[in-house]
Amino acid sequence: MSTKDVTDRQVCEAYLRWSNGYERWPYEILSGWTGEPEKVCYRACERAAGRGLVEYGVSLRSGWLTEAGKALLEEERWDGIEPASG
């Protein structure tokens, strides 16, 4: 049970899914994918925001990807890594 077990790529993918109408918050999506508790996944979202991958207004739950977050997903896809399923 550790934040390091939730990757920035997974966080960005969760925000992308949420922004496309997925009915759960990004940290809930991450919890389902990773099996980590929601508080650990929320902390991973905070970490991604601190790294400039996610921005938010009032609440981190309803944030959005920055250009850096989008670039991370695009870079990972070009490396042949498929997005997390779930």
Image (tube, grey):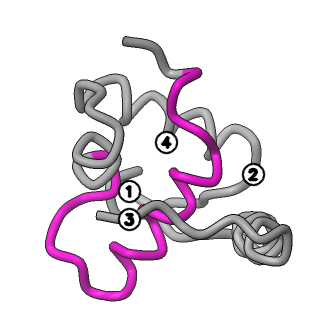
Q: Earlier in the sequence, mark 2 or mark 4?
A: 4
Q: Nearer the viewer, residue 48 or 34?
A: 34
Label 3 Cα crowd, 10 Å radius (few <14 / some 14-19 / many 20+)? few
* Dot 4 amino acid type: Cys
For mark 2, what is the residue? 52
Decide whether residue 13 is among the magenta residues: yes
Magenta residue span: 4-27
- Return the residue found at the far top: 1
Decide whether residue 23 is among the magenta residues: yes
- Residue 29, disc: none
Image point (17%, 64%), residue name: 24
- Up/down of 70 relative to 76, above or below: below
For mark 1, what is the residue? 58
| Disc 3 and disc 2 in contact, CB within 8 angstroms | no
Q: Earlier in the sequence, mark 3 or mark 4?
A: 4
- Up/down of 83 relative to 5, above or below: below
Screen quadrant of the C terminus = bottom left
